[in-house]
Amino acid sequence: MTFTIHASKDGHLVQTLRLKPQAAVSKARSLNKAGWEVHITSAQGASFSPPMFGELLQSRDDASLAPDRATLVALSDDTTESAMLS
């Protein structure tokens, strides 16, 4: 399964792909901590805001990541630091 991390800050938009939920959550959390507004989408179209990242780590079956389980993404307005994307 693939996960897309969507990040924005100061007019810049970045999307990165990760194959495992642990890698996606780790990257998204580091970007969020650096002041980026982030959310993760699953291959099925579900969207996860930072408070929902734990659901990706706890999920055992792909069906639980389907769009009908997703809630609206609430993005953070915190832009206190710049981030280096690697």
Image (spheres, grey):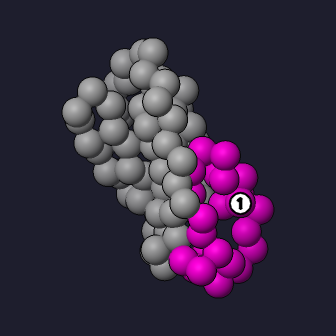
- Asked whether residue 19 appears in the rendered view, the answer is no
Query: Residue 6 placed where, x, y %?
Result: 38, 50
Whether 52 is drawn above or below 27: the answer is: below
Read off the magenta span: 48-71
Of all residues, the one furthest to the top in this rendering is 80
- Asked whether residue 52 appears in the rendered view, the answer is yes
Whether 85 is drawn above or below 80: the answer is: below
Asked whether 77 falls inside the magenta stretch, the response is no
How many circles with numbers are drawn on the protein? 1
Query: Residue 38 placed where, x, y %?
Result: 46, 43
Q: Quadrant of the C terminus?
A: top left
Pick the residue in front: 46 or 19. 46
Pick the residue in front: 20 or 40. 40
Whether 20 is drawn above or below 60: the answer is: above
Name the residue type under label 1.
Answer: Glu
How crowded is the residue under tag 1: few (<14 C-alpha within 10 Å), some, or many (20+)? Answer: few
Q: Residue at x 54, y 48 (%)?
A: 74
Query: Residue 67 placed where, x, y %?
Result: 54, 77
Pick the residue in front: 79 or 53. 79
Query: Residue 29 placed where, x, y %?
Result: 56, 37
Q: Residue at x 42, y 52 (%)?
A: 5
Of all residues, the one furthest to the bottom in this rendering is 63
Pick the residue in front: 16 or 69. 69
Magenta stretch secondary structure, dominant: helix
Residue 26 horizontal side relative to residue 34, left or right: right
Q: Residue at x 27, y 27 (%)?
A: 10
Q: Residue at x 68, y 78 (%)?
A: 64
Pointer 1: what residue? 55
Q: Secondary structure at mark 1?
A: helix
Whether 45 is drawn above or below 50: the answer is: below
